[in-house]
Amino acid sequence: NAAILAQRLPGLVESVLESRHAEERGFDLHDAAFVVAAVERLIFDEESHMLAKSYEAHGQTPQKSLGETEMQQVVEDYLVRWLMGDDEEGTKLLLDNRTLL
């Protein structure tokens, strides 16, 4: 979630900014691309975790092929989790009562 990303990102940025390379040469496009790639990876890891929770909530695994109905349920679950962020109570309320969607 955003909290995990917020915890990990400052350390990454700080380590890049305090590196000897930065002191000796400054930053170039390669350095910026490295930081962007690292941030993308952090986001991907978090989103993958959230998607796995959505599969789990429906008794599925990411390795299993799903039918249209099952895939729709997993995607809806994921989108609710993504939109609600850290609001677990609100997420549970929406997922338990899909008429609110």
Image (spheres, grey):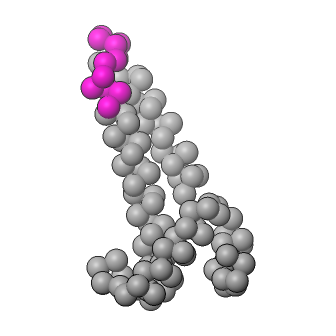
Q: Which residues are magenta?
A: 22-33
Examine the structure image and report whether residue 52 is included in the region drawn in magenta.
no
Residue lying at the far front in this picture: please name it.
Answer: 68
Name the residue rendered at 42%, 23% in the picture.
17
Examine the structure image and report whether residue 28 is included in the region drawn in magenta.
yes
Name the residue rendered at 42%, 73% in the picture.
52
**Residue 75: image x %, image y %?**
48, 74
Q: Main secondary structure of the magenta part?
A: helix
Q: Quadrant of residue 85?
A: bottom right
Q: Quadrant of the C terminus?
A: bottom right
Q: How many numbered marks, from 0 up? A: 0
Looking at the picture, tell me which residue is in the foreground, 22 or 100.
100
Relative side of 101 to 17, left or right: right
Q: Quadrant of the N terminus?
A: bottom right
Q: Quadrant of residue 34?
A: top left
**Residue 86: image x %, image y %?**
64, 61
Residue lying at the far top in this picture: please name it.
Answer: 24
**Residue 61: image x %, image y %?**
36, 82
- Does residue 35 show up? yes
As displayed, is residue 60 above or below residue 62? below
